[in-house]
Image (cartoon, rainbow, N blue to C red):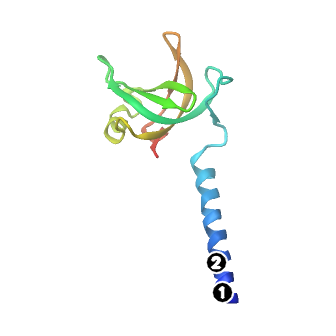
């Protein structure tokens, strides 16, 4: 490998690493923690997992996604005014997603309540 080729290869690697860092900095807001057992109600959290179930509520037009994470499952709640219809269009059962929101509780179970359709990304 000649000197110019080595320099080109190093520059390409540096550029790719820079893009990876920028991607992670942009996609995960600073004030959001990954969901864990230590997360408290009203914390801003995110979770990643596989969509196991997707259903609209019988009344209200809200959307509930059940996702399987590495360490369990959690429901993601989208109010109809917070982009439930938009999310219903873009997310399918079996998709891997990342969801940002507020840790909430419904009927004794923890859930993530999202604020807008943009809070869910299909990975």
- Extreme residue toward the left, this view: 58
Above or below, 80 against 29 in this view is: above
Task: Give how far across and how far down residue 42 sits, in percent.
Answer: 61, 23
**Which residue extends farthest front?**
1
Q: What residue occupies the far top of the structure in this picture?
A: 107
User: Does residue 114 appear in this view?
Assistant: no
Mark identifier at residue 25: none
Q: Closest to the observer: 35 or 116?
A: 35
Q: Tell me residue 47's x, y (percent).
A: 55, 34
Mark closer to the chain start, 1 or 2:
1
Q: Which mark is residue 9?
A: 2
Q: Nearer the viewer, residue 103 or 73?
A: 73
Question: Contact, CB < 8 Å: mark 1 with mark 2?
Answer: yes
Residue 18 locus on image (x, y percent): 65, 63
- At a point 50% along the width and 25% down the height, the residue shown is 73
- Few, some or many residues within 10 Å of mark 1 (<14, 14–19, 20+): few
- Residue 9 sits in which quadrant? bottom right
Can residue 15 be seen by looking at this rendering?
Answer: yes
Relative horizontal placement of residue 110, taking residue 11 as reference (left or right): left
Number of numbered discs? 2
Q: Nearer the viewer, mark 1 or mark 2?
A: 1
Residue found at x 35% / y 28%: 54
Name which quarter of the figure residue 44 lies in: top right
Is 39 placed above or below 122 here? above
Quickly name the residue at label 1. 1
The residue sitting at 61% across, 30% down in the picture is 35
Question: Vertically, is 22 above or below 1?
Answer: above
- Figure quadrant of the N terminus: bottom right
């Amino acid at each position: 490998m000649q000197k110019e080729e080595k320099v080109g290869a190093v520059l390409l690697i540096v550029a790719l690493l820079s893009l990876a860092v920028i991607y992670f900095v942009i996609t995960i807001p600073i004030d959001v923690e990954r969901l864990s057992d230590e997360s408290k109600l009203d914390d801003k959290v995110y979770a990643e997992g596989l969509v196991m179930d997707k259903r609209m509520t019988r009344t209200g037009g809200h959307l509930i996604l059940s996702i399987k994470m590495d360490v369990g499952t959690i429901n993601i709640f989208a109010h109809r005014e917070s982009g439930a219809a938009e999310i219903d269009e873009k997310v399918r059962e079996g998709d891997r997603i990342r969801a940002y929101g507020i840790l909430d509780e419904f009927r004794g179970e923890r859930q993530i309540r999202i604020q807008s359709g943009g809070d869910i990304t299909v990975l």
